[in-house]
Image (tube, coloured by chain):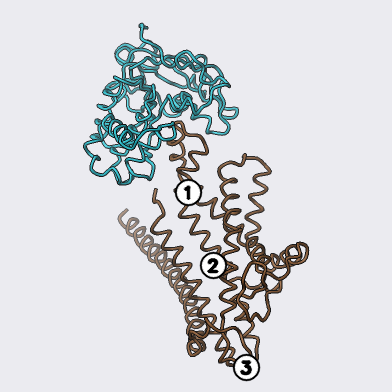
Amino acid sequence: MSTLTALRDVTFERNLSLRKLKGKIFEIIAFFAILLGIAMLLTLLIDVFLDGLPWLSTKLFTEFPSRFPDRAGLRSALQGSLWLMVLTAALAIPIGVGAGIYLEEFAPQNRITRFIEINVANLAGVPSIIYGLLGLGLFVRQLGLGRTLIAGAMTMALLVLPIIIVTTREAIRAVPQSIRQAALALGATDWEVSRDHVLVYSAPAILTGIILAMSRAIGETAPLITIGALTYIAFDPKGPFDIFTVLPIQIFNWISLPQSDFHGLAAAGIIILLAVLLSMNALAIWLRNRLLIRW
Amino acid sequence: MDNNHVVLETKNLNVFYGNFLAIKDVNFQVFRNQITAIIGPSGCGKSTLLRSFNRMNELVPSARSEGKILFNGEDIYDPAIDPVEVRRKIGMVFQKPNPFPKSIYENIAWGLKINGFRGSKSEMDDLVEQALRGAALWDEVKDKLDQSGLSLSGGQQQRLCIARAIAIKPEVILMDEPASALDPIATLKIEDLMRELKENYTIVIVTHNMQEAARVSDYTAMMMLTGEGERSGTVIEFDRTSVIFTRPKDKRTEDYITGRFG
């Protein structure tokens, strides 16, 4: 009897160390995976900074693009990006948030609603160039808007709409049912519950989603190239119906030139673009940590 | 039973979830300024019955009901009656404290605002104080009315929810196991509070805790599944709490109360 117990114990011990070893192996693999990701990012950043730092100057902000590298800047591209972001936000936020609220709070639970929901989710996965083709066909040509900021903003708005709708819905769904019930039990109407509770408590998460959607719009290049924003712009855009260029396109432009000085300029442009994107994402994270309600 | 004024009365009430008959043929009364406890084993439809009284059951998309619930003689399921009006008159306190993530003051003031309060700030201040005093919470929170309702302890949160419910002066307060998420001391406070509240309100409480039902309630409705292998619940016995707990007429009630069953 005693030998049996002992034997069983030995088997147990061996099993346990083997099980622990498996865990350890997995941990090491996972560690190398993250190491690889970070190493790639660092290499990229270091390379960009080495190339771009000498070209990083205030001239980038004040000068228009030029065929002379030491006189070239990002002035029109920065303004174009800013205009594009403001117009895209003005179009996409009310429609996207409105659609999200409707789907989550008011839409009847039927087949049509489910069909729309699935397709909104699918739209978020459509390659951006497709949106560019749609924008080119519909806004630039059909509506005759030309290669203007407004056509670009409408295209970008379509691109980010699914993201805003999906994040709005998730934010609304995160408000617990118990809160809705508490409000309804006080004799509130559905709209009063949405207005004073659900939308108020989900606002920080919706805002976070909007910022992330906007940072996507700023970094996006392909749809704008498709609608024809790949042009030399040496003036300040004055309104939504002006032609324009944006940061990533100007960077792309410079990289495609043969002179190595322009590659330095492009790297400097990348640094600026990264700074904008990272600060937007940081703002989103800060908002999320500060304003989000922990239930 | 006696001449007390009947506030709520169910008549042959059936409640379905889809095709599933959750409660069947329920008939009983709730008397004014009394505490009525609904007791019974899990899954016999106590909460379903309670939520029928303020039409909260309708929030479950598949729920539907047959029969009548009379509130002061008027059928609250009459198609002409808006559930919003019913809930204004019949308040509810939930199992888990669910204060709004707003200030303590706003937790109380919101119900008044949506229900048409049009007074001055000082009148509102008075009503908020009254409600918090009514829920025995005023002394604990009077210096921090602008803090979040979520910053309070569980027991305080539940009393805040009671204050929120009584602020709009309903006639009836429904309580769905209001103390089940609280420690014994907080539970006692809630029970004391219920005894005070019945001076002005009619209370219906669902509870798993038979000692609690015996301690606080005047009347008790015993719910049970209708039979072996059945999934529908019904009220098998309704009487004064003292009768239910000392000489119940139904054998099943006796078994449940003495712990032989459930």
**Which chain: cyan?**
B
Give the residue furthest to the left. Answer: B139
Residue B39 in sight from this viewpoint: no
Q: Quadrant of the C terminus of chain B?
A: top left
C-alpha distance separating marks 3 and 1: 53 Å
Say which quarter of the image contains residue A105.
top right
Residue B221 position in % (x across, y down): 39, 18
Q: Which residue is mark 2?
A: A215
Element under label 2? helix
Q: Tag 1 or tag 3, which sits nearer the N-term?
A: 1
- As drawn, the label of residue A259 is 3
Q: Residue at x 40, y 23 (%)?
A: B40
- As drawn, the label of residue A174 is 1
- In the rendered structure, which amino acid carries the disc numbered 3? Gln
Residue A133 position in % (x across, y down): 73, 67
**In the image shown, does A260 or B127 lie closer to the viewer?**
B127
